Image: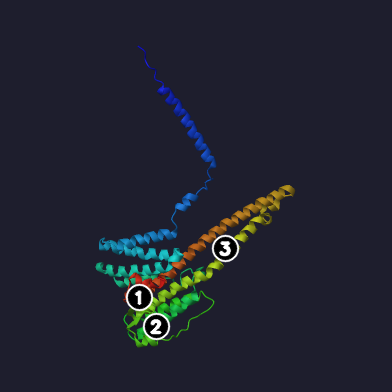
Amino acid sequence: MQTRQTRGSACSAGGLLRLAAAVAGTALALSACSPPRIDGRAEAEQEPSPCENALYAALGHDATADSAAPALLRYHALRAAWGEWLDVAANCPTRFDEGVLRAAKAAARAVVLGGRWGVEPGDWDDTVEAAAMDADTDLAGLSARIDAAGAALAEDRAGFAVEVLAARGAAGASLTLSDRHKAAAELLASLSDEDARLKVYDVAAILASPDAAVDAANGLRASTLAVVEMDCARSLVAAAGDAEADGGADADATDADADADAVASADDGGTVGGTGDAGATGNGADGDAGTEVGGTDAVAGTGSAADDADGLAEAARIAALRGYAALAASHAYQAFRSGYPMFDEALFAQDAG
């Protein structure tokens, strides 16, 4: 009886070896053709920006506040959203108006919910006021980001209107509130080369109707104080937007000049380094080499110091812009507390075009 030889196992082993060799060769070829990987680039692209972090956090807390969660949880969500929307205004140039108005809305809603646990409205008033820019705020760089003269005019005009309303006994109007507007106007005026404040304004419409008025921006009727405060808030938001539009080209030109100066400094590295110790102590060929080393060290050191200075300046600018956003939000908050409608169509109708 003949037995049949089975050669499948031998052929299978040989085939696997050839397949493995082919796969390895293909992998080597592909790796040779792959573009070089820039170390850290993928990680940086996956890292959310400060704007994205603030926006995601604010939207998350807004969603909690609008949900069917327990009232205490919604209250704490609104408290968090207040600060996060200010961060959005400071870190997201195209969302400044949204950050300001939604921060004010969160604070006004928190006042209503907080009353259930004995949180006094005055406590929130203090919180909102404390976040706004004041004389102790480092305002370096803010004048390049806002139309300071226009903002000062809006604050001064609102301060005069509130003073008139207080004299007429309008609900919510006080000389203290008027003084806050005028102090802000003084601070903003100090950031500008021109002072557009008039000190005295036409208040015929206010005198005719000190209790209620129609907001010209959207046709809604609210208390006169609420309309005055919301108009001031919108004017501060507009002052930030106007400065961004006017200053964009200048900022680009400044950045281009800075880049050109950096290139020139790098090209002249040997000359700069000649003043260093390595260049001064060298002689002949060694002296030339020393000069180059000194130049490299000088340029590297200057670059590192410049980066640190830029980082500190940017942090100060963001902090000042957040204080300015909080100032605008405090006026919108006062408008809401005085009965101004809080639905989005009333707040963002001017952006619907």
Q: Secondary structure at mark 2?
A: helix
Depicted 332 relative to depicted 63: above or below: below
204 horizontally vs 118: left or right: right
> Which percent across, then down, holds residue 273?
66, 55
Dot placed on the residue nearer the N-terminal end, 1 or 3: 3
Q: CA distance from mark 1 to mark 3?
A: 40 Å
- The crowding category of the residue bearing disc 1, from other C-alpha atoms within 10 Å (few below 14, some 14 to 19, many at least 20), is many
Mark 2–mark 3 contact, CB under 8 Å? no
> Which percent across, then down, holds residue 345?
35, 71
- What number of labels is visible? 3
Q: Secondary structure at mark 3?
A: helix
Q: CA distance from mark 2 to mark 3?
A: 42 Å
Q: Secondary structure at mark 1?
A: helix
Mark 2–mark 1 contact, CB under 8 Å? no
Q: Quadrant of residue 226?
A: bottom left
Q: What residue does disc 1 label?
A: 335
In the depicted view, which residue is nearer to us: 170 or 4? 4
Mark 1–mark 3 contact, CB under 8 Å? no
Three-letter code for the amino acid on which mark 1 is drawn: Ala
In the depicted view, which residue is nearer to us: 271 or 223? 223
Q: What residue does disc 2 label?
A: 161
Q: Residue at x 54, y 42 (%)?
A: 33
Q: CA distance from mark 2 to mark 1?
A: 14 Å
> Residue 255, which numbered label?
3
Three-letter code for the amino acid on which mark 3 is drawn: Asp
Most extreme residue toward the top, as rendered?
1
292 horizontally vs 149: left or right: right
Depicted 13 relative to depicted 94: above or below: above
